[in-house]
Image (tube, grey):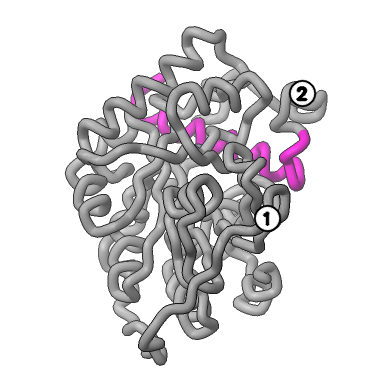
Amino acid sequence: MNSFSRFLIPLFWCGVFALSGCADGLLNDAVTPTAAATRPPRVVVVTATPSHTPPPPTATPTRAATPTSAPTATPFITPPAPGEAVEIPILMYHHLNPLPPDASELLRTWTVSPQQFTAQLDYLQAHGFHTITLKQLADFFERGAPLPTRPIVITIDDGWLDAYTVAYPELVKRKMVAVFFVPTNYATAGGELFLDWAQAAEMSRAGMELGGHTISHEDLTQTDLGEMRRQLTASKALMEEKIGQPVVSLSYPFGAHNARVVAETQAAGYRAAVILCCGYQQQAGNLLTLPRIRVSYEDTLEDFAGRLP
Ligand SMILES: [Zn+2]
């Protein structure tokens, strides 16, 4: 298996889990029989995912930002009483590139076109949402730090190059922020597939949050304890060294987590972690299992808006 193939496999598994439906349940302690039965040997799937090459630079839209009426002062919300939830959607993206009409359901599940992405950002801006980082979310619940009204978190997983070439400039243009979850081996590889460390550091300096996604996109429910700890701590240490900032958030690869994974994530020093499923009710007690809202290729802007509070 060559190195390119190794990078494609995690995406495939993201898709397998996603196509199993709203997959939070199967991503807990035991993988369900259905998911287990569909898990082929890792090498088999490589050629089934041929089109993950990032779009060429010309695919990046040049659409101008929609002007919005910026308020002179941003009102803030303060933390709820203990145990109470707050409506804070956490959007989940992976690929941002155009797809051919015959693209597979798998790809359509995990991809949003650049045009859709910018339209969604414009929608958020026009409707008074304020993007925040997961560090801000943790500060809100743990320390009572206020958040802007209509807070929303944008997350982009896996460190594909289009996170840097498509998402990052569109966010900067609108003074918005997002959280980028990057496996450290991917950023070390960089190249035509993945954003590299210099790009990650640039985004961090610009106010984006870089979050952990392990070293090699491992399913942490399937590793032994020593390897789980290595995946969580060594990736965090390397990312912190590369970007010069603390890494406080994690996306569990494949969303896969259980009580042991969550406990080790906390022990490794992560203050917030996200899963794949579903909704936008956030509370202090689920800072390490924060639900997200998936955005997909089939979503119209009305679909997108309909999933928000
Ligand atoms: Zn991932």
User: Mark 1 or 2, which is nearer the eye?
Assistant: 1
Residue at 62% x, 46% y: name it: 284
- The picture quadrant where one finds residue 212 is top left
The relative height of residue 63 versus residue 43 in the rendered view (above or below) is below
- The picture quadrant where one finds residue 293 is bottom right
Q: Which residue is mark 2?
A: 37
Query: Is 104 left or right of 243, judged from the image as shown?
Result: right
- Label disc, if present, on residue 81 of the rendered structure: 1
Image quarter hosting the C terminus: bottom right
Mark 1: few/some/many CA within 10 Å (<14, 14-19, 20+)? few
The relative height of residue 173 versus residue 268 in the rendered view (above or below) is below
- The picture quadrant where one finds residue 68 is bottom left
The residue most toward the right is 33
Q: Which residues are magenta?
A: 1-25
Residue 220 in percent (x, y) is at: 56, 22
Magenta stretch: includes residue 19 = yes
Kind of residue indicated by mark 2: Ala
Kind of residue indicated by mark 1: Ala
Residue 262 in percent (x, y) is at: 60, 27
Label 1 vs label 2: CA separation? 44 Å
Query: Is 224 left or right of 190, judged from the image as shown?
Result: right
Disc 1: residue Cβ within 8 A of ligand 1's nearest atom:
no
